[in-house]
Image (cartoon, grey):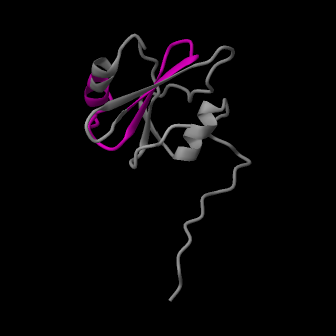
Amino acid sequence: MFALPGGPIYLARAPVDLRKSIDGLSVLVSQVLQQDPFSRQLFIFINRRRDKLKALAWDQNGFVLYYKRLERGQFPWPALDAAQPVLVIEARQLQWLLSGLSIEQRQALPVVAAQVLA
């Protein structure tokens, strides 16, 4: 597993042409996802067959591009929704996705926001 940037993780629900490299994907981040590609966020893209995935992030002085190709099977990608082209997920949901699991695990324990009582 790679080190995640500190910000949110954005999934582009529509498949993209993964022949695009850093420059092409950063244009998609700004124009399609309407986000700042230089922010501390991770942007995830998938191809049409859902067997290849690219993740783009800005890291202090340059872009980092992650690439994963499945030898068998497909990523369980969320359904395309024209009303919501981008999905914000948590780091654990990304780990599930990269492991071949759905990001909507019904058996997963909920996140607990603990606080100290004074």
Q: Residue furthest right?
A: 107
Q: Position of residue 51 (x, y in %)?
A: 58, 16
Seen in the picture, residue 111 relative to 39 is either above or below; the reply is below
* Magenta span includes 32: yes
Point out the residue furthest to the front here. 61
Residue 54 x %, y %: 46, 24
Left/right of residue 70 with respect to residue 32 in the rendered view: right
Q: Residue 28: x, y in percent?
A: 31, 23
Residue at left offset 41%, top offset 30%: 85
Which region is colored magenta?
27-56
Residue furthest to the bottom? 118
Front residue (pair 42, 104): 42
Q: Is residue 29 above or below residue 103?
A: above
Q: Quadrant of the N terminus?
A: top right
Tell me the residue at 37%/30% (across/down): 64
Q: Is residue 108 toward the left or the right of residue 118 in the image?
A: right
Task: From this view, report whether residue 114 is shown above or below residue 7.
Answer: below
Residue beneath the point at 69% across and 14% down: 72
Residue 103 magenta:
no
Q: Nearer the viewer, residue 111 or 80?
A: 111
Q: Which image quadrant for residue 58?
A: top left
Q: How many marks?
A: 0
Relative placement, left or right, of 16 versus 74 is left
Q: Is residue 112 visible?
A: yes
| Residue for point 51% across, 22% down | 53
Is residue 84 shown to the viewer in this render? no
Comparing 105 with 24, the one in front is: 24
- Lateral position of residue 63 relative to residue 82, left or right: left
